[in-house]
Amino acid sequence: MSVTTNIKPRSRVPLRSAVIHTAVITRRNVLRFIRIPQLLLFSTVQPVMFLLLFNYVFGGAITTGIPAGPDQYINWLIPGILVQSAAFGATATAMGLTEDLGAGVIDRFRSLPMARSAVLTGRTLADLVRNSFVFSLMLVVGYLMGWRFEQGFWKMALGFGVALLFGYSFSWVMAAMGLAVKTPEAAQSAGFLPIFPLVFASSIFVPTSSMPDWLQTFAEVQPVTIVANTVRSLMIPEEALELLGLDQGTLILQSLAWIVVIIAVFAPLSVRQYKKAVG
Amino acid sequence: MNAVEAQNIVKHFGDTHALDGVSIQFEEGIVYGLLGPNGAGKTTLIRVLTTLLTPDSGSASVAGVDLITDPVGVRRKVGLAGQFAAVDEHQTGRENVEMVGRLYNLSREETRSRADEVLDRINLAEVADIQVKAYSGGMRRKLDLAASMVGRPEVLFLDEPTTGIDPASRIALWDLIEEMVDGGTTLLLTTQYLEEADRLADRIGVIDQGKLIAEGTSDELKATLGGDVVEIHVHNDDRALAVECLTRVAGEEPKAEGGSLSIPAPNGSKTLTAVVRELDSAAIEPRDIALRKPTLNDVFLTLTGHKAEDETQPVSARSRRRG
């Protein structure tokens, strides 16, 4: 320790190295996902089960406020269920981080001359990769069940991208929560606390118009509804947009704003929790 | 240049004084063994020296780099194998080592050749392409060691490298560490086992309750510990008489510990014979009698007046965990 304390620590990792480190950690986390059959199974089977359950069990009964048509519910459901999988899937970020904390892996990383941000960024990026796989699978299953992208491939891809980005932002929320509670078990239970109200009090499964006023007010302003509606506005037939009162442009901007705000709040918070958890 | 130079390192966790002003220094090319019981502060000191923890006060440099002002610089020069093998179950041995190599900023080619080299050196080349979940505990420790060496660290830190592994693997690991040391690696290792410190370390520091309480070569320390002891167990009725016998042999009161009595045995088996003779003439039949080497408990009894694993010591769960 030098006597003059105003010397700035030279503890910076060059950006180029930081990018490599992030790629290395991302690859490590993706490999984990691929090589643990249970992880692969549960992260794909669960969303598909939700899809089948809602479409075939509840779908027939849900008609209020949904544009009529032979495949009316599946077209409503698919955009929503992508957002639901993104939210549920984000708990994996918390689980993965807390498992690494417990296994001493994080200590190893921290003793290396690597960018510290790579541990968190590599984790959330790996979950983005996993989400894009899960989403693709759901769209294939959805297609077999009668879902069609009515506004062409590119709009569908844009909706896919928005759902993916939302999932990425939600990974940061879960990262912060996981690092705050520290154990995988606690991370899973704690994670679902915000997820359940956000996912079920939203337009994911049913139109908000059928909810009581007080709930409707909440449901219509919260990010999950906004993002689900955005994805929906890019996939359902154009003539249904007006009927539902969905404005594509506004929704996309609102979604992006939410995503940016969530990342801006929870990424720094995660970094702080990370420092606290390991310090 | 000193490999490690630490002055008055203090680290408290709430009321637990994990480190209470520890100063150590040692030169390059030697093995420094840090010996102490659970909760003594060994792991905390390693965590401070590898930049995982910031000390509350004190100063230190590792491989000539200041710990406080340039932690990344320190990380470039050190390797750490923690108390639990920090290897990834679902990657192969090679992938584990290569990942760490890339994080040490080695190029792709360098990482590959360096991984081959350390895996070969550590005798894991044959299983390098199998996922770690199939490895035994000893193999994981070895792999962890390989990963800590891949970046050619100037100073290597091993935190209880053989705790929790079977005796055969322990001996294999000792051989390996000795080989590394012959290659000129500077090493700081912590251990709870006197035997381990004895075999591997050029210099030993004894740490207890956050303080360095003795330091020296293995021989120097043993000399202060008094060497071998004769230990006997007798029936309770014979105890008073046995104390008399032992006092006659040793010229001092025997140490009582649990149900056993012990005296120093400066003359080894001759002392043992003398004890047997005394007991025999007093018609005492000991339940057990043995000549034994000093244990960590003896070291601690001598140096601190309490046992290494003294349950009556107020050691919080946290400091225990931090070893």
Image (spheres, coloured by chain):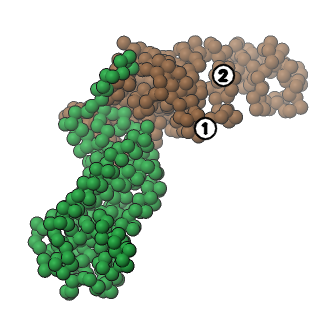
Chain colours: A green, B brown
| Sooner in the amino-acid sequence: mark 1 or mark 2 | 2
Q: Say which quarter of the image contains residue B106.
A: top left
The residue indicated by pointer 1 is B316
- Judge depth for marks 1 and 2 and give the one in front: 1
Q: Which mark is residue B304?
A: 2
What amino acid does circle 2 point to? Thr
- Per the model, the C-alpha gap separating discs 1 and 2 is 19 Å
Q: Position of residue A199 (x, y in %)?
A: 35, 68
The residue located at (40%, 38%) in the rendering is A107
Residue for point 16% across, 78% down: A242
Give the side of residue A5 with respect to residue B220, left or right.
Answer: left
Does the image show residue A189? yes
Q: Chain of mark 1?
A: B
Binning the other alpha carbons within 10 Å of mark 1 as few (below 14), some (14 to 19) or many (20 upward) gives few
Decide: is A45 above or below B316: below
Q: Nearer the viewer, residue A7 or B136?
A: A7
**Quadrant placement of the N terminus of chain B:** top left
